[in-house]
Image (cartoon, rainbow, N blue to C red):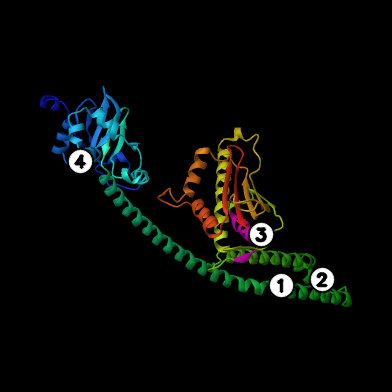
Amino acid sequence: MSQDSSSQISPPVLSQGSDRDLGLDSTLEELSMYDFQVEISCTAMEVARIFEKYPLLPGAILREQGKYIGMISRRRLLEFWIRPYGKELFFHEPLSMLYSYAKTSILQLPQTTPILTAMQLTLRRSPELVAEPVVVETAPDSYKLLDISELNLVSWQIRGIETQVRYERSQTQMIQNDKMASLGRLVDGVAHEILDPVSFIWGNLTYVSNYSQDLLKLIAAYDQECSPNSNYITYLKEEIEFDFLAEDLSKSLASIRTGAERLKKLVTSLQNFCHIDEVYPKPGDLHACLDSIVLLINSRIQGEIEIIKNYGHLPPVYCFMGQLSQVLMNLFTESIDNLLNEIVRNQLQPDNNSNQHKPRIEITTKIISQAATKSEAPDSRWVSICIADNGPGMSSQLQKQIIESFSMEKRADKATSLAVSYRIITAKHGGKLNLRSQLGKGTEFEILLPLLS
């Protein structure tokens, strides 16, 4: 083909990438790519001249009568030319002949592919293809070439950003953990200071009750022995309403006892919730832990939400009780928020309340047999803790978002309480956290903890 024919090949165009800072979610469309289209009827000599003029051009997009058929790289052309008699055989022949010999598998990706994903795909290729450029589909039947060196450089920059982000998050998490530990110690100290006078009141109530009954008996004996016609005694008993006082004194002492008992339980629950975990897990009473959480959330539900407990027979379970309490609190909070929001919606739309049931949270504990993996024995025993509500339920899209937040590969900007709970259950306890929900039929969270033999 003549020089005039060679000039018919359009020169390559380097498209400029995005001017914004690249991040973990950056895609291929933000990178610089080459647009170089060649008809397969052109000769290798014509393409060689273009490569000589543009030394950074990684290859050429091949078309046949305007239709995309593949790509041939500069490296592949060079490999054939340096072979014995390579130039004589292919230099003046159309590219179709050379492409039939040099054709290899091509990595073709859409421009919306994340840069880190594209880098992982390139590294999975066979060693002889690792340096081949990537064909990027920018539009229907429109393709560009991405130099592998450009992809390598950018991906390493993003990896550096990712490492820095993870470091900052780990530092933030360490600071948060230290703050929570300090807060736990502070709350534990305050609870201990409250518990001391409560215990004093509780311990003396028995004696005060006995003393009051003895005094009432003594007064009754005096009343019987003394002259019944004593005007002063009669006047004094009427003034202090003695009959009512004698009846109400025992009721008042019973009320004080009930209040002191409730306050003692509340402080003990607060101490259990702020428990500082040690390095190794310890056996704990899950039912006591659940009861403590229910007692703490009573102020939120205010009698509007019914709590139903279906407790099975559970042995002590090895766990980090403080972290497990936080997980249970997170799950209860999620259910309570959904139910309270539904209550508000029903109050604003009274016409839709005809078939509404009383908001309810049901707690079920039991031991089940379930295999975690195919290699496990089928009789592996697990402790199951189910927290189910009869709220509005979750859409499939919301469930998908929650489940995606559980994955470490999804680099969320902010860790949610459910994602933190998932990692505590799986990473710290070797368990599982399952989510089941359906619109109109409520939501159920299930915690599975392995039961050691």
Q: Tag 2: Cα neighbours inside 10 Å, few (<14), some, or many (≥20)? A: few
Picture quarter containing residue 138?
Answer: top left
Determine the residue located farthest toward the front in the rendered image. 84
Q: What element carries label 2?
A: helix
Mark 1 vs 3: CB contact within 8 A: no
The magenta segment: 282-299
Q: Which residue in the protein does label 2 denote?
A: 234
Q: Is residue 193 left or right of residue 58?
A: right
Q: Is mark 4 on a helix, strand or loop?
A: loop
Look at 65% across and 35% down and name the residue there: 355
Q: Which residue in the protein does label 1 denote?
A: 205
In the image, 165 versus 257, the foreground residue is 165
Cα separation between marks 1 and 3? 29 Å
Q: In this view, does 13 lie to the left or right of 313?
A: left
Look at 47% across and 45% down and name the residue there: 404
Cα separation between marks 3 and 2? 56 Å
Point out the frontmost of discs 3 and 2.
Answer: 3
Query: What type is the residue that disc 2 sits on?
Result: Thr
Say the numbered circle drawn on residue 82. 4
Point out the frontmost of discs 1 and 4.
Answer: 4
Q: Which of marks 1 and 4 is nearer the N terminus?
A: 4
Point out the frontmost of discs 4 and 3.
Answer: 4
Q: Which residue in the protein does label 3 denote?
A: 287
Cα separation between marks 2 and 4? 129 Å
Q: Earlier in the sequence, mark 2 or mark 1?
A: 1
